[in-house]
Structures are given as structure tokens and as C-alpha cells.
Image (cartoon, rainbow, N blue to C red):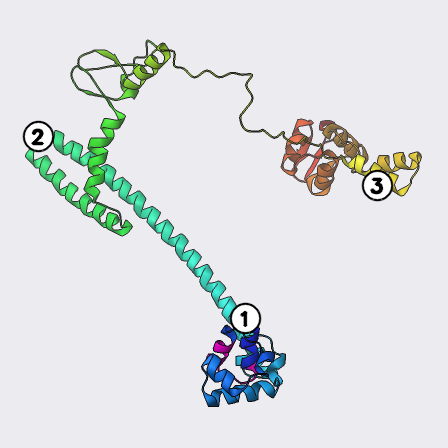
Amino acid sequence: MAKKDTYLALLRRGIDENTAHILSDSGVKVGDLKKFDVSTLRNNYGLKKKIAESVLDAVRSGPRDSSKQRFLADVLSDRGKKKVDKIEEQRFKREQKDLHSELLEKKEQLRIARVEAFRNKKLVMNRLGKTIELIVKLENTFDDESKDEQRSKLRDQLETRGLEAARDHEMLELVGTPQDIVDFRRKIAPIICLHACPSCGEEIDPLGSNVVEDMTDYSLACWECEQEFRAPMAQIVEDRLDNGSRIKIDPKKKPRLPVSRQPKKKKPPSVTEQMLHDLESTGASAEELEAAVESSKLSGVLMSIDDWIDQTIAAKGYIQAQEHREEFIIATGAGATKFNKWMKKAGLVFNKQTGRWTRWEDR
């Protein structure tokens, strides 16, 4: 730290960087330099005579205006702050704001472009999958076909579908060729998915060759030689069960990792409890609490639909959707779309001319 301070102090006094480096690396301080003479600087530090004289003059003359500056960047930078015009400052802020909005717009465009690219890639991939499946069917039909005319037509179709698959395959930049996918679909996938009869070697689909009569065991039947055999996986599982190497689980054993308890679910307070709590906090009496709870429409239990219908008809003599629908929803809590259903369920009759629901005897 002392070397850095010495280096900066020498730079502040106008000494060049090389000389300041030499003197600061030697460990000398600025206060000690004032006591040196020209011969000491020449003999001990290897400075030339003119440079040694200039160093002594700069050190003995004291710090300059830049001595208050602390960092090297402040020393080497231009002195004084540049005055910025208000108009230029406003123009700069406006340009900065426009640039920021432009960047946001570009970012949104890139996001939309990525989404569109993914959507297009997905469409191409789905189209390639359908083309591959069609090529697989055509090749299977081509192998089974014996007529030359039909084989020629199938060959033309295979060529056309192969070009379509190659186009989509190249657009997706996939490794290999579409024929590799077709060969995997026709030759490798059936070996993995299908079972072969141990006697005749016929490929067997597990879905159509499973022996349904014996549900306790998973066995297959060959439709060619009528031989029943067990699937290799079922045989492996059976051997594992017979040898007694099953995994035993102790129900009383605790889990290895600590299991945190779930927090207890607290029921949210009802509207009545909230109102009681608020009224108690205000210091109201018990009678006032009961009166406030009973008078409040929110705290009471919802009215039954039949009671509301009887009450409304007794007061008005009719029920109209435009007039009473909102009151029906608030009072009963029923859905707005079930208004007509509840009116019919209550045995009311609808008059299309007046748009009112009334009882049968009051129609």
C-alpha cells in the first residue's frame, strides 16, 4: 500500500511513470526524497542527472492542485467537470428511452420468432413422422406383393414419399437419412416389441397372442404351431420369486431421510366471526353484537330457494327474471344460469307475454 501511495504521490507532482515506478518499488517515501541529493539518486537508484534534479525540484515544491485526488484514474483524467447543456441532456435521455423501447421490441420479435420456429419445426416433424409411417406400410406391402405391375406402382409411391421425407429430414437437420428411421421402424422396433416363437420363429404380438384362459400367468400362444410359451420377462420374474430374492419391506422401519410434518390446515374464519371480532375490538356490548349480526345480510345463513320464492310471491305476486334475478343470487347463493330451472322445479308457470313466473292458480 505504501508503494502505491508513493507512486500516486509522485505522479501528482508531475514525475513520469517509469521514474515513479523505480522509486516506489525501491520502498522510498516522499518525505525521504526531500532529504536526498542528486548524487544519492544517481548512485542508489540509477537515475540520470537531469531526471534526478527534476525529481528533487518536484518533491521539494510540494503537492499541486491535483493532490486532493486519490485515485490514479482521477489524476490522469481531465480536470474539471464538463457542463452539459439541458437540451443535450434531454435529447440524450430521449434517445436512451427510444433505444430501450427499441431493444424491448427487438426482444419481443426474437421471442415470437423462436415460438414460430418451434411451431414450424413441430409441424415438419409431425409431417415427417406420418411420411415415415406411410413408407413403412408401402415397403411392407411391396415385400408381400407378387405382381410386377403393383410393385411398379408401389416403387413410384416409395420414390415420391422418400423425396418428401428427405426434404423434411433436411429441414430438421437430423443425423443420418430417412431410410435409417424406416429400417429401425421395420426391422429393429419389431424385434424389441414382439416375441418370437421358440419352435417356428414366428413373430407374435403380445396383444393378440396372450392366453386369456389362464389369467394367473402371462403366457403366449403361437398361431402357426399352436405352442404355448412364456414371455422371457415373465420367466425372469417367476425365477426371481421362486429363488426368494424378493425385496422385503419392514413396515415399522422409519424412513432414512427426515420427513417434515405438514402444517395444520386452519379453517378460514366465517363472516360472522370476523364481524364479531371487529365489534368486540370496538368495545360494543353483547346486545349490540347480536343486533348487528342479525341485521347483517352477509353474516346470516343463506335463504333456501323455496323460502325465497314463497316470500317474493307473497310480496309481489309474481317473479320476473330481469327484476328479481340479482336478488335471487344474493339471497340464495344459487347460480345465475339456474334461475329458470329453479322456477320450474318450484312448480311456477311462465307467461311469455308478461315475462313473469306465477303459481298455477294465479296465472
Residue 19 versus residue 254: which sits nearer the camera?
19
- Residue 21 in the magenta stretch? The answer is yes
Which secondary structure, mark 3?
helix
Which secondary structure, mark 2?
loop
Dominant SS type (magenta): helix
Say which quadrant the N terminus sits in. Answer: bottom right
Q: Could you tell me residue 76's position as x and y percent?
A: 52, 80
Q: Residues within 10 Å of mark 3 (few under 14, many from 20)?
A: few
Which secondary structure, mark 1?
helix
**Label pair 3/1, CB-CB below 8 angstroms:** no
Under mark 1, the amino acid is: Lys
Query: Residue at the spot x=31%, y=43% of the render?
Result: 126
Instruction: Using the image, tell me which numbered label, if any, was put on residue 146.
Output: 2
Instruction: Using the image, tell me which numbered label, if any, was put on residue 97.
Output: 1
Q: Which residue is mark 3?
A: 278
Query: Residue at the spot x=64%, y=31% of the render?
Result: 341
Residue 355 versus residue 137: which sits nearer the camera?
137
| Whole-number angstrom distance, CA of label 3 to CA of label 1 | 50 Å
- Residue 283 in the magenta stretch? The answer is no
**Label pair 3/2, CB-CB below 8 angstroms:** no
Of label 3 and label 2, which has the lower sequence position? 2
Task: Answer above or below: position of 195 versus 27.
Answer: above
| Whole-number angstrom distance, CA of label 3 to CA of label 2 | 91 Å
| Whole-number angstrom distance, CA of label 2 to CA of label 1 | 75 Å
Mark 3, mark 2: which one is toward the viewer? 3
Under mark 2, the amino acid is: Ser
Magenta span of residues = 12-23
